[in-house]
Image (tube, helix red, strand yellow):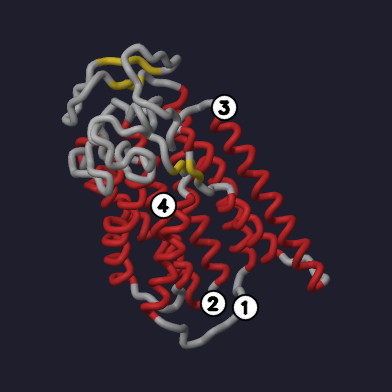
Amino acid sequence: MNSTAGLLSAGDVYDDIDLRPDTTTHGGPAMPADTGSASTGFIVWAAALVFVMTPGLALFYSGLSRYNSALSLMMLCMMAMAVVSVQWFLFGFSLAFAEHGSPFIGDFTMGAVNTLDTHAFPNTAPQIPSILFMVYQMQFAGITAALVFGSVPERTRFVPAMVFVFFWTTLVYDFAAYWTWADHGFLRNLNCVGAPNYDVAPCYVGAYDFAGGGPVHICAGFSGLAYLVVLGKRKLIHAEHHNMVNVMFGTGILWFGWFAFNGGSAGAANTRAAMAATVTTLAAATGGLTWVFVDWIGSRKMSAFSFCSGVVAGLVSKMNGQLN
């Protein structure tokens, strides 16, 4: 997400952007403005691939569930994406990425039509326009909400689930994303929170989460566990996966989309994106082979389920954060 470590000035040079006076509603110094760069096209492509991960996740979940719950799980995933898309455009993106918020949450200055802008975020995604960054991050928020439903098949109704998604995205995901990626988020600036000039000049030295290990996977995992505890046990517990073809196909789509999930998090068409894509596919391949081998030692069988589990585990393991 963070393709630069410090504040850009009008003297900084980029090959595919120029600098012009800010004309947004936020005010402030000169900011980079998109001129039709290769990075813009690259992130449009990345946003589309990350969107495709949600149907892939829906297929993955449907194959693991009972046959009479498969379609409802797919519907939950896609409806969650739709609800989050509207919430994100109206005010979620502003809460998660506002440039002038507190250490804990943003404001509403970039809600709705205020996101329709060519200017970039100079300290987060300086080489693409803010409207594209909003659409790319929208896909992250959407699939994160859908991930939660993997813990509660056969135990939730559509309307309460969509109400939950709306409030969960607002009160959990938007906060966690702001802490991690926004200019003034306290995790991103852990080394200087509370400094006298923090409000006007955050240091951008703290936790570094490249592609969502915290806001996406940790938040979704613990939220799924909490959701499960509230709803309780299933009436019928089963261990059979009704359609491993769906699981395999869904895994392939997730692997495919993860190239953009991690590669696009570089924020530009650059070497960092290429490196992220490379280690992503290596992590998936290594995870799948390792899980199959370990399972074979105990069962003497080559398991498609083990392969899919290992691939997904490898992909997720690539996204861990660190402290600068």
Q: Give the CA separation, mark 2 to mark 4.
A: 29 Å
Residue 286 relative to residue 180: left or right:
right
Disc nearer the start of the sequence (1/2): 2
Of tags 4 and 1, the one toward the viewer is 4
Local crowd at mark 2 within 10 Å, few (<14), some, or many (≥20)?
some
Instruction: Find residue 312 and report its horizontal and vertical position in percent.
Output: 60, 56
Q: Residue 215 carries which label?
A: 4
Q: Give the CA separation, mark 3 to mark 4.
A: 25 Å
Q: Name the residue under label 3.
A: 271
Q: Give the CA separation, mark 1 to mark 3.
A: 43 Å
Q: Give the CA separation, mark 4 to mark 1.
A: 31 Å
For residue 205, what is the image quadrant? top left
Numbered marks: total: 4
Of tags 2 and 4, the one toward the viewer is 4
Disc nearer the start of the sequence (1/3): 1
Disc nearer the start of the sequence (2/3): 2
Residue at 52% of width from left, 55% of height from top? 56
Residue at 53% of width from left, 61% of height from top? 59
Instruction: Find residue 121 and report its horizontal and vertical position in percent.
Output: 32, 30
Q: Look at the image and tell me whether residue 48 can be seen.
A: no
Q: Mark 1 points at which residue?
A: 240
Residue at 44% of width from left, 70% of height from top? 225
Local crowd at mark 4 within 10 Å, few (<14), some, or many (≥20)?
many
Of tags 2 and 3, the one toward the viewer is 3
Local crowd at mark 1 within 10 Å, few (<14), some, or many (≥20)?
few
Q: Residue 66 carries which label?
A: 2
The type of residue carrying mark 4 is Pro
